Image: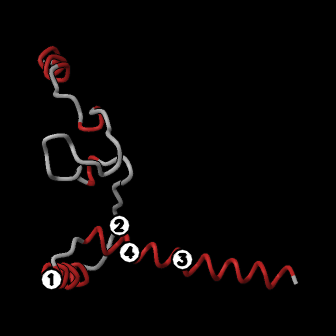
Amino acid sequence: MAKRLDDAVGQRAPSKSAKPKTAAREEKPGNSRPLAKSADPAYMKFTTYIRKSTHLGVKTRLVSKEKELSDLVEELLSNWLKKNELITTSRMERDEK
């Protein structure tokens, strides 16, 4: 049985991460669609826990706006970073005085 397992493991298909990565969000020749975020090296997978009711409410509203959850999360986190960068910068400037 161990030999069959070794044979099966040795015959696995290459993982998705083994594929060569291409430049960020560029279109492939002959294809009018941009590179998927999951295959784009400029993006990373991000997992977190939220309440089911929050997820359902957000998902419902995003569908009606034809927007993706990843775009909303990117927007919210980018805005949070900008806001907190300003707070940190203003605190540093105040402390220098």
Q: Secondary structure at mark 1?
A: helix
93 lies above or below 74? below
Indicate the position of residue 95 as horizontal and vertical percent values. Answer: 82, 82
Per the image, label 2 sits on a secondary structure element best described as loop
**Residue that label 3 marks:** 82
Q: In the displayed structure, does residue 78 sit left or right of residue 38?
A: right
* Residue type, numbered disc 3: Lys
Task: Determine contact: label 4, label 2, CB under 8 Å.
Answer: no
Q: Residues within 10 Å of mark 1 (few under 14, many from 20)?
A: few
Name the residue rendered at 64%, 83% in the picture. 87
Marks 2/1: CA distance? 19 Å
Residue closest to the eye, 12 or 85:
85
Disc 4 to disc 1, how far (Cα)? 18 Å
Mark 4 lies on a secondary structure that is helix
Camera-side mark, 3 or 2: 3
Residue type at the position of mark 4: Glu
- Give the residue at mark 2: 48
Check disc 4: other Cα within 10 Å, few if <14, some if 14-19, many if 20+.
Answer: few
Quarter assignment of residue 9: top left
Badge 2 or badge 1: first in the primary sequence = 2
Residue depicted at 18% across the width and 85% down the height? 61
Q: Residue furthest right?
A: 97
Please state, as top left, top right, bottom left or bottom right, where the N terminus lies in the image: top left
